[in-house]
Image: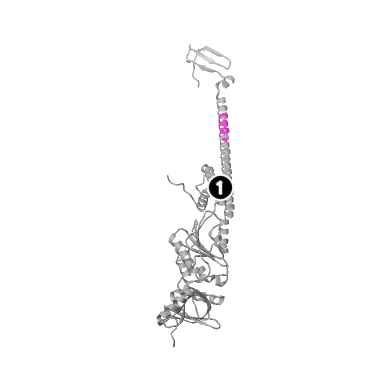
């Protein structure tokens, strides 16, 4: 079974921007708008959660650079 | 003359003296002023290191000279003392760096001119920040204040990054080699998208390591883009010039690498708020349009009904005018049946139906 796709915050933000652009494009129509708005709202909430909660993963490399 | 102590040949004695020197002084650090600097056969460097009262002959291979040196410069160097086979006392230099603001500045300008000529600082070769940054390699001393500032700011501003830290010296004679090894390590591992070289503020002597020729060349040759945050805004090093990007301080590097999460959250919230308002406006527009269409349709239907009713009324009036009963009321009668003498015809009046016999039929003129 393949792993679920994990996206970075930047990728999620890019996705959201793309979703928002649809509303201002010629493709916009009211029939699809409500569902698309709900999807965008859910993604925005997810990004906000990520932004507030995600920590950086800091690793000190074990190698001793003072030696050749 | 009486012979006392150990007897050596000259070669043996020189070897023993060198062994003793090696044991007693495996590595010595000296500071002094350079005099009689010269390069022989483009391979060997000779100069005297002196202070007010003494002078020491020094020697080193040219490839180990990492920053330009000239007569009159103050330098710090490490190396080992040695007695040559010709009985001359010499100091073999392993590393040398200018010290003092004047010497550092002079060395900086000489090397800058040389490397600039080679195109190492060419703005056209600079690479931008990688898009969608997810991994950063940091080269710094983890004990340094500059490193702490960088980590604090980057953690405050953003999350989800993989930050790999190569702990190295950031000042002193051995720091340049350590940083070079760290850059090469990151280039071999290929695990990070950008390398940040971080070092907080310090004196000109502290920051002199960032003018090391080999370090500058390694930065210029790195396949992974490099950003530097060395010292303060006013401290310009050759490493800064060779790097793809330069932050004025370690904190500024963190600001350049990642956006501010709070600003991003505000932007996100505003975006959704505007989107909601836009969508509601679109719904209002659609409702208005539907209302207008419905009103138009209603008006058209009413108009059609009115016209039809008028037509019906007109038709009724016409029909009414043509109604035979109305003519009978005016005193006329309808005669039906065969018109010939002796036959019976039917006469219909407004109030009566009369059967009458035809007596005579004459044509009218």
Identified at 56% across, 52% down, the residue is A51
Q: Main secondary structure of the magenta part?
A: helix
Front residue (pair B352, B13)? B13
Front residue (pair B95, A46)? B95
Where B13 sits versus B195, above or below?
below
The quadrant of the rendering that contains the N terminus of chain A is top left
Query: Mark 1 = which residue?
Result: A45
Residue B299 in the image: state x and y as whole percent: 58, 37
Q: Residue furthest bottom?
A: B1
Label 1, secondary structure: give it.
helix
In terms of image quadrants, where is residue B328?
top right
Front residue (pair B300, B222)? B222
* Residue B302 shows in this picture: yes
Colouring rule applied to residues:
one colour
Front residue (pair B275, B243)? B243
Identified at 53% across, 18% down, the residue is B334
Where B328 sits versus B108, above or below?
above
The quadrant of the rendering that contains the C terminus of chain A is bottom left
Residue B333 in the image: state x and y as whole percent: 55, 18
Where B164 sits versus B68, above or below?
above
Determine if the magenta segment contains residue B318. no
Which span of residues is magenta-colored?
A: B303-313
Residue B275 in the image: state x and y as whole percent: 57, 48
């Amino acid at each position: 079974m393949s792993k679920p796709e994990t996206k970075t915050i930047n990728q999620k933000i890019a996705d959201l921007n793309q979703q928002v652009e649809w509303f201002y494009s010629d493709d916009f129509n009211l029939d699809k708008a409500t569902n698309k708005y709900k999807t965008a709202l859910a993604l925005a909430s997810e990004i906000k959660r990520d932004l507030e909660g995600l920590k950086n993963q800091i690793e000190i490399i074990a190698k001793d650079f003072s030696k050749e | 003359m009486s012979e006392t102590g150990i007897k050596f040949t000259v070669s043996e004695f020189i070897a023993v003296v060198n062994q003793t020197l090696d044991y007693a002084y495996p590595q010595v650090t000296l500071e002094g002023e350079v005099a009689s600097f010269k390069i022989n056969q483009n391979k060997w460097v000779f100069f005297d290191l002196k202070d007010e009262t003494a002078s020491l002959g020094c020697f080193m291979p040219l490839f180990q000279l990492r920053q330009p040196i000239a007569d009159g410069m103050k330098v710090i160097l490490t190396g080992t003392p040695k007695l040559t086979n010709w009985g001359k006392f010499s100091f073999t230099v392993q590393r040398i760096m200018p010290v003092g603001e004047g010497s550092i500045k002079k060395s900086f300008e000489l090397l800058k001119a040389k490397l600039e000529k080679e195109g190492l600082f060419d703005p056209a070769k600079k690479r931008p920040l990688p898009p969608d940054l997810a991994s950063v390699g940091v080269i710094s001393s983890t004990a340094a204040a500059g490193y702490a500032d960088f980590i604090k700011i980057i953690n405050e501003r953003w999350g989800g990054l993989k930050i790999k830290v190569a702990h190295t010296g950031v000042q002193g004679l051995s720091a340049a080699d350590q940083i070079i090894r760290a850059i090469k390590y990151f280039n071999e591992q290929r695990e990070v998208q950008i390398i940040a070289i971080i070092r907080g503020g310090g004196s000109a002597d502290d920051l002199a390591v960032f003018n090391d020729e080999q370090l500058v060349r390694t930065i210029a040759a790195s396949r992974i883009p490099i950003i530097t945050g060395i010292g303060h805004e006013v401290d310009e090093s050759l490493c800064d010039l060779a790097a793809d990007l330069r932050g004025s301080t370690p904190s500024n590097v963190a600001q350049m690498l990642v956006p501010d999460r709070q600003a991003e959250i505000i932007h996100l919230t505003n975006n959704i708020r505007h989107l909601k308002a836009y969508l509601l406006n679109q719904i209002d527009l659609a409702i208005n349009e539907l209302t207008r269409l419905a009103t138009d349709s209603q008006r058209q239907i009413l108009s059609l009904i009115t016209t039809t009713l008028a037509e019906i009324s007109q038709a009724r009036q016409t029909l009414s005018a043509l109604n035979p009963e109305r003519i009978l009321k005016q005193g006329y009668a309808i005669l039906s049946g065969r018109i010939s003498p002796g036959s019976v015809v039917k006469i219909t009046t407004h109030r009566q139906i009369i059967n009458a016999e035809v007596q005579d039929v004459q044509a009218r003129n």
